[in-house]
């Protein structure tokens, strides 16, 4: 069903969740009363733990723990549950003493794989995950003294590569992946000093991934600019007072550009280099000997914070950001002895960030659960007169506040609710349409500067046009005879005449039809395009980048998704079609991986899948999230404030919940957070209903006769951007 979509700024970071290893309403500067953690609880001892990461390995919506042990020479996986405890470890023997790890899907099977660096042996090994916690090696490359690693697509071939900091080699070694878990080539780039820490992002916004590297004993940080081949050239060099250890990339001053943070180990400080003022570094005191660094919005106030593992002080330091490039005095959290590794994520599904720590002195890994922090509260329900089926959000009355409109399927009406800008809404303004209204869309159809509505009347085989006044009132406009049980509708300029047209999915006619607008609110029938069985939902966009609007269709009866490419003058021409796992009831178009091409997200009875667009209108499955999700509606936004698109799922009658699936920078969907709404949620719309700069959700609950308002907290379950940055303990 139609939804409102938000597009965020792309932000890249190495790792699937927040991980760093050694190799709010409260103003910044105050101690946050809602930011607290329990005592450390051991989840594993012995073996010489060296580096760790957390992610959902087995697609059960629970975070799992991956640890490499240098003394016992093994990789251990502990599958998690929602109570923050872990199953006994599944252990994979390794051929050497591991020093660091990096997680990514290196072989394109939508399962998490791992890269492990062996410093003493001079090797990097890729191990393919089986989706159940097991790993098997697929490729090994020689790299002199490998330390930190950062994965990305460095040569823009669609496969994941690995940039490795070669300490004694004095270089970056880029291992180019073949997309099947193998390595095709090693590209060498010399750098200053002995690099141990590395982080990746497109720092100069030229479409090529760059890296920041820090040497072990020499002060300074080098920004190495990617050339699109796996090689780099020197860009900016930042001068530091002492040698750095951990690195993280994030936007600390909320100017939309990526900044650099690093730990100054010998000085017990964190330094920030802002892109807006690179010559004026800012230093902030941490605990003694900070060796690992995370960046994330830990207190959910929309501003980036910093966490360090302080190996000389046996604690974590949290430094809260003010959104302008300043960090407050550190709040400390006790850990075990000599913490050298740090990871973060929502381990117990309470919407709050937790920490996992490698305490080298105690030879153990421990969990610190958050007991505070903002998160989505209980949904506020707005009572409807009828059974809402579809929903769209926008500022219909020009007051600067987001409103919403729903179709009442049983009453033959639509209801407008004016937003107050606080997350609350006024009384309904109802307009009669046709029998059994289903889908709706909004646009300025008569070009008067006010948003209008077009509504599918499934039972009447028609589309009602409602002309907006700009005050929240709507007047009856033309009624378009459609036929074929219209169920979904979208607006777009399909013939490039500057006037909005309509595209309608006709469920029983097995077709999609275009109706051309004349700019006055009237529409004339255009071309009909036959497709597969029972089209159920639509999404529009220029998928092949030819300047013409195309249409994506969820074909429920044929269990397929398709894209109809727009032709000259408006008719839909070539059809690209592919099978999906179940009966698709929802489809959205969005650039899930930030490559400038619209991808397709499909929700069917078997789960949610992302299909990557190659730019010509051809699609390949990028990720599939099977299991309990039975989507009847989808919405896309950056719910976790990490610069990456996430997907909200209205799960229909299956669970009476909404789930948020968190996206990574490649467009994959991973761990989820789930929120209870009303009975039979059928559609969701995204808007900032309380004007705090964070996307919120409005969910139509058909059987409950309510709309649930979920006010976002900016973490969406977890919210981290960080990089694994090993250094010698």
Image (cartoon, helix red, strand yellow):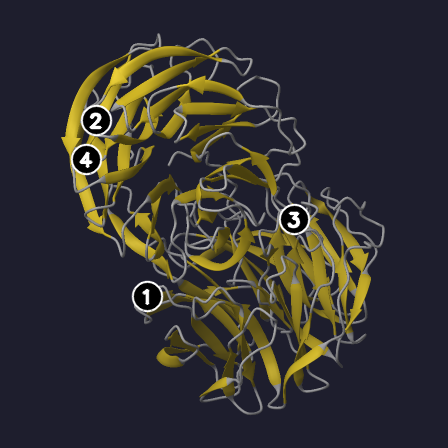
User: Is 709 on the left or on the right of 430, as rendered?
Assistant: right
Instruction: Compute the Cα span from label 3 to label 2.
Output: 42 Å
- In space, the residues marked 2 and 4 are separated at their CA atoms by 13 Å
Closer to the eye: label 3 or 4: 4
| Helix, strand or loop for disc 3 | loop
Front tag of 2 and 4 = 4
The residue at 30%/14% (across/down) is: 479
Q: Which residue bears the numbered disc 4?
A: 508
Residue marked by disc 2: 513
Instruction: Classify 10 Å Cα crowding around label 1: few (below 14), some (14-19), many (20 and above).
Output: some
Q: Is residue 215 above or below residue 261?
A: below
Q: How many marks?
A: 4
Which residue occupies 81% across, 52% down? 328
Dot placed on the residue nearer the N-terminal end, 2 or 4: 4
User: Where is residue 397 shown, x and y percent of the image?
Assistant: 56, 17
The residue wearing badge 1 is: 109
């Amino acid at each position: 069903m139609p939804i409102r979509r938000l597009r965020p700024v792309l932000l890249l970071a190495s790792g699937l969740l927040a991980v760093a290893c050694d190799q709010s309403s409260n103003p910044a500067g105050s101690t946050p009363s809602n930011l607290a953690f329990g005592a450390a609880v051991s989840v594993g001892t012995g073996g010489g733990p060296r580096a760790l990461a957390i992610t959902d390995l087995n697609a059960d919506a629970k975070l799992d723990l991956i640890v490499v042990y240098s003394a016992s020479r093994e990789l251990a996986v502990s599958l998690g549950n929602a109570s923050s405890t872990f199953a006994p470890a599944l252990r994979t023997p390794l051929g050497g003493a591991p020093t660091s790890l990096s997680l990514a899907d290196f072989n394109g099977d939508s399962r998490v794989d791992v890269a492990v660096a062996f410093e003493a042996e001079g090797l990097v090994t890729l191990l393919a995950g089986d989706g159940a916690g097991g790993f098997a090696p697929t490729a090994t490359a020689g790299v002199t003294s490998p330390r930190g690693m950062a994965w990305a697509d460095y040569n823009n071939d669609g496969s994941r590569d690995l940039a490795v900091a070669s300490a004694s080699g004095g270089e970056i070694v880029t291992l180019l992946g073949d997309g099947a878990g193998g390595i095709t080539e090693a590209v060498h780039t010399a750098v200053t000093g002995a690099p141990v820490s590395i982080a990746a992002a497109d720092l100069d916004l030229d479409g090529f991934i760059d890296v920041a590297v820090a040497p072990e004993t020499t002060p300074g940080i080098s920004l190495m600019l990617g050339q699109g081949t796996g090689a780099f050239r020197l860009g900016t060099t930042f001068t530091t007072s002492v040698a750095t250890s951990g690195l993280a990339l994030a936007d600390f001053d909320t100017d939309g550009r990526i900044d650099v943070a690093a730990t100054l180990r010998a000085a017990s400080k964190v330094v920030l280099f802002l892109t807006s003022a690179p010559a004026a570094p800012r230093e902030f005191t941490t605990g003694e000997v900070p060796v690992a660094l995370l960046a994330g919005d830990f207190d959910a106030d929309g501003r980036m914070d910093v966490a360090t593992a302080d190996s000389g002080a046996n604690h974590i330091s949290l430094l809260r950001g003010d959104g302008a490039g300043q960090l407050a005095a550190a709040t400390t959290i006790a850990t075990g002895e000599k913490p050298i590794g740090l990871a973060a994520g929502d381990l117990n599904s309470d919407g709050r960030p937790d920490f996992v720590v490698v305490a080298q002195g105690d030879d153990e890994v421990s969990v610190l659960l958050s007991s505070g922090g903002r998160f989505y509260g209980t949904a506020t329900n707005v009572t409807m007169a009828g059974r809402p089926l579809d929903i769209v959000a926008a500022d219909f009355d020009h007051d600067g506040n987001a409103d919403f409109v729903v179709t009442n399927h049983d009453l033959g009406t639509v209801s407008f609710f004016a937003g107050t800008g606080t997350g609350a809404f006024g009384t309904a303004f109802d307009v009669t349409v046709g029998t059994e209204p289903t889908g709706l869309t909004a646009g300025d159809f008569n070009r008067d500067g006010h948003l209008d509505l077009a509504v599918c009347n499934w039972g009447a085989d028609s589309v009602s046009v409602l002309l907006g006044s700009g005050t929240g009132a709507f007047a009856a406009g033309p009624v378009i005879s459609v036929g074929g049980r219209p169920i979904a509708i979208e607006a777009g300029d399909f013939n490039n005449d500057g006037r909005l047209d309509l595209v309608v999915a006709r469920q029983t006619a097995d077709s999609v039809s275009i109706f051309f607008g004349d700019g006055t609110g009237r529409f004339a029938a255009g071309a009909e395009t036959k497709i597969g069985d029972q089209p159920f939902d639509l999404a529009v966009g220029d998928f092949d980048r030819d300047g013409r609007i195309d249409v994506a269709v969820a074909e429920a009866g044929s269990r397929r998704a398709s894209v109809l490419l727009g032709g000259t003058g408006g008719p839909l021409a070539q059809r690209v079609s592919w099978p999906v796992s179940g009966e698709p009831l929802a489809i959205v178009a969005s650039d899930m991986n930030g490559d400038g091409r619209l991808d397709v997200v499909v929700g069917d009875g078997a789960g949610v899948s992302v299909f990557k667009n190659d730019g010509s209108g051809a699609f390949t499955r990028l990720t599939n999230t099977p299991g309990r999700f039975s989507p009847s509606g989808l919405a896309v936004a950056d719910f976790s404030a990490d610069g990456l698109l996430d997907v909200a799922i209205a799960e229909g009658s299956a669970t009476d919940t909404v789930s948020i699936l968190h996206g990574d920078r490649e467009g994959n969907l991973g761990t989820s957070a789930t929120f209870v709404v009303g009975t039979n949620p059928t559609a969701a719309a995204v808007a900032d209903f309380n004007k705090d700069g964070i996307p919120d959700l409005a969910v139509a609950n058909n059987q409950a006769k309510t709309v649930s308002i979920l006010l976002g907290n900016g973490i969406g379950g977890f919210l981290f951007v960080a990089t694994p940055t090993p250094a010698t303990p």
